[in-house]
Every structure is written in structure tokens, then in C-alpha cells.
Image: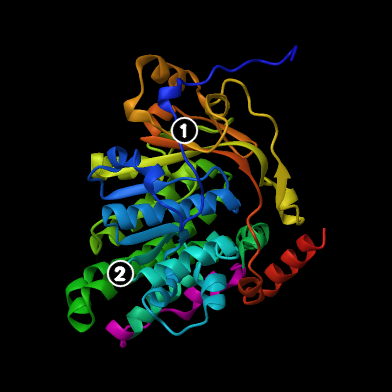
Amino acid sequence: MAGQTVVPGLSAAAAHPLTTLDANASLTDLAWLDEVVGQARIVAIGESAHYNREALLLRHRLVRYLVERHGFDGLAIESGFAEGRSVDDWVRGGAARLDDILAQGISSLMGLWTETRGLIEWLRERSGVGFGGIDLGGSNVSLLPALDVALGYLAVADPDYQVDSALRETAAAFAAPSALSQLAAMTGYAELPTERRDALTAGLGELTVRLTSMRLDYVARTSVAAFDRARRALAQALTMDAVFRDTARGNIAGALFARDAAMADTVELILKDRRRIAVAAHNGHILRARLSFPGMPPSTMLGLHLADRFGADYVPIGTTIGSGRTLTAGEGFYRGEIFTDMDPARPDCLDALMTATHDGLFGVNLRGLSAADLAAVRAAGEQRFGNVYAEVDAAAAYDAVIHLPTLTAATPDAGAIAAAPPEVREFFAAWSGR
């Protein structure tokens, strides 16, 4: 059509057509990934935006592939570390209600979709595959889940040690019940008197020194695993405090740096007791590069930390998208407009290149491209995350990319939503009525 830019795609040899997103179907169409995965101990599975049906189905299918074809025995997702213990307990045969686990054990609304339920149920049926969360916890709007793990551990390991009650009281003063109240949490923190904010930071630092210095005594009274979990939870509470402080000062880049470095530490801890793990998170976290959004300095993301620590043992698989519905960015989301139509992709972005390559679902091994195809990937200097674009050198950032030609909204899970906080139930009720 006149006026439209025609984007040439990659060669036909670069595309590996995929037959389905059905997690239960044959895995033969994923055999090309065997070379990509190799002997890596960490394989990351990306998504361009949260809460999309196709991305969640792909996650389930790739996790099954990694478990059954390559012996992976752990899944870690972009959800709270502290809360994730309850999910792992259920996966290992625990008696809790799955509705409660999905609503409270998986943070940031990530567990409120039937596609996520399907994956968690499969982990339990499969047996032997552990679950973990890698994020800061409390949907990144509350220190309490992480802080309570640390305080609970101290009560057992050091019952005579008195923690100032003001520490938790201050953390509770701005804690929010869900990701929907992010603005309220940030506002509540900013309105705290400076001396209370400073006392919270100092108190968390003091607890960190106490826990670290008493390690040998505490391990003797409990276990290495219990100590490691408490120390990681406390580190996340301290990191979240730093995120609140940075955000209040307008230092969004500092908040990104802190969060992704902390997630890398958590992945490393989870891997300590596992042979090989899959890590499922946003493309912006898993890429093996610095991420540049317009108007912000480049940020060092989770994937770059993991590549630095694990080298070739870290393999990120990114995703690109064609058309459909994506997560609404900004204030519209909090008004109940969860999804929005995607704009046509910019012609010079990675997603446009992938869309022009093949009509359906397919993948590309970025390590096996011809010189011409590799040059085309490098020339596509941006990647879209929903309707937002970031500078990404995909050839450096990922080892493989899978293209989802169409995105739709994930399916709300009525049982999980019913077990969620009131504001979440009201939010989904309003959305379902649109």
C-alpha cells in the first residue's frame, strides 16, 4: 500500500516454525532449541508484556520442554521471593487451597490467570520441579512479606534479640495490599517524616549486620537453608526500602538498578539447590544487555548480572510480538483499562523484522544466523514492549527469539481472584463488566 514502509524479513532458513502453544502437545517442533540450551544451567524465558495469554502458554510449554528434554528441576518467576515459599510447598504436595496460593503466593497479579494456574498444577503433577520467586516481594509496594520472613527467623534463631517494634510499624505505615495501590504506597512513603524514613533504613541496616555477623550461631540453631532464606528476604526488604527512597527522589534509574541486581542475587540462591532452572520474566529483565528507555540512562538489568556471573551457563530466550492486545501502560491501567490495542510496529524495530519473516508462530536461533540475517537483526535497534520501545541490540541480548504473531488478554481466574484482596476483586469485577 502506498505510504507504508515494506520491511524485509530474515531468510526462510532462519525461521523455525512452531506448531502450537499447547503445553501438552508434542515437543518435536522445539528440537531446534536443543542447540541453544546446550548445557546452560539457567535459561530465561521472556515476555514483551505481562498478563498475555499467548506469552503465558509459551512459558508453560517451554518450561515443560526444559524439564522433560533437559532435566531442569526448578522454575523461578518474576514474583515475590518471600511469598514464593508457599507456592513451592504446594507444588511439593502441600494441603493449602490453590486459589489462596495463586492469589497470595504469586505477587503483582501474576497468579490471577487460568494460564498460570495450569502451569502451577503441572508442576505439582510433574513432581520434582521446585518453584521460586525472584522479585522483591509485596508486589513491590510493601516491605512486609520480606521483612516478616526475616523477623520470623530471628524469633527462632535469636529469641533474646529485641527488634525495635517501630521498624515494622514504619514499614506497615505505607504498605499497600496489591500492585493496584502502587501510587498510594509511594505517596504514603513520601509523606512519612524524614526521621522515620531514615530510622527505617538504619534499622534494616542494623538487622542486616546482626544477621550476617551471627551466621555461624544462627545456622547451628536452625539450618543453612533457613538462614539463607532469611538473609535473602532481609536483603530484599532493604533493597525495596532503597527503591522507595530513590523513587521519592525521582531517581527511577537507581530503583531499576537496585531491583534487578537483587533479583540476580535471588536467582543465584535458588540455583544453589538446583541443577538447572528456568527463569520467567519480562524481556526487559532477562536481556543480556543494558536497557535504554527514552529519557533515561542505560540500566543494568537482571540478565546482564547473570551473564557476568554465569557466562555461557546463562541463556536468555526473548519474545517479539505482532499485533493484538497488550498491557496498558500508565494511569489507564489503574482505572481498569487493563489491556489496550497495540499500535503498528515501527518499521525499524525487531518486532517488525520478525513479523515480516514468517506469518505464524516461529523461533530464531540468533547464534546460527547467516551474516546477512545477523546484520538485519543488528540493524533493528529497538524492541517493543507492548506499545513502549527500548533500544536493544537483540543479537547481543538474546540467544534465541520466539515470535508471537498475535496477543490476547489472559483469562482471569475466578477462584484466585476471589481469594485476592478486596481492591483486586473490585478491579477485576469492574473490568469484566466492560
Q: Which residues are magenta?
A: 156-177
Q: What residue occupies the far bottom of the structure in this picture?
A: 160
Q: Residues within 10 Å of mark 2 (few under 14, many from 20)?
A: some
Label 2 sits on residue = 128
Q: Nearer the viewer, mark 2 or mark 1?
A: 2
Residue 170 in sight:
no
- Amino acid at the residue labelled 2: Gly
- Amino acid at the residue labelled 1: Pro
Task: Find residue 187 and report its horizontal and vertical position in percent.
Answer: 66, 58
The quadrant of the image that shows the C terminus is: bottom right
Q: Disc 2 and disc 1: Cα gap in Å?
A: 39 Å
Q: Residues within 10 Å of mark 1 (few under 14, many from 20)?
A: some
Residue at (28% x, 82% y) in the render: 157
Q: Is residue 339 magenta?
A: no
Label 1 sits on residue = 298
Residue at (63% x, 73% y) in the render: 420
Q: Is residue 176 magenta?
A: yes
Q: Is 369 on the left-hand or right-hand side of 256? A: left
Depth order, front residue of 314/365: 365
Secondary element at image label 1: loop
Secondary element at image label 2: loop
Residue 356 in sight:
yes
Q: Is 387 on the left-hand or right-hand side of 24? A: right
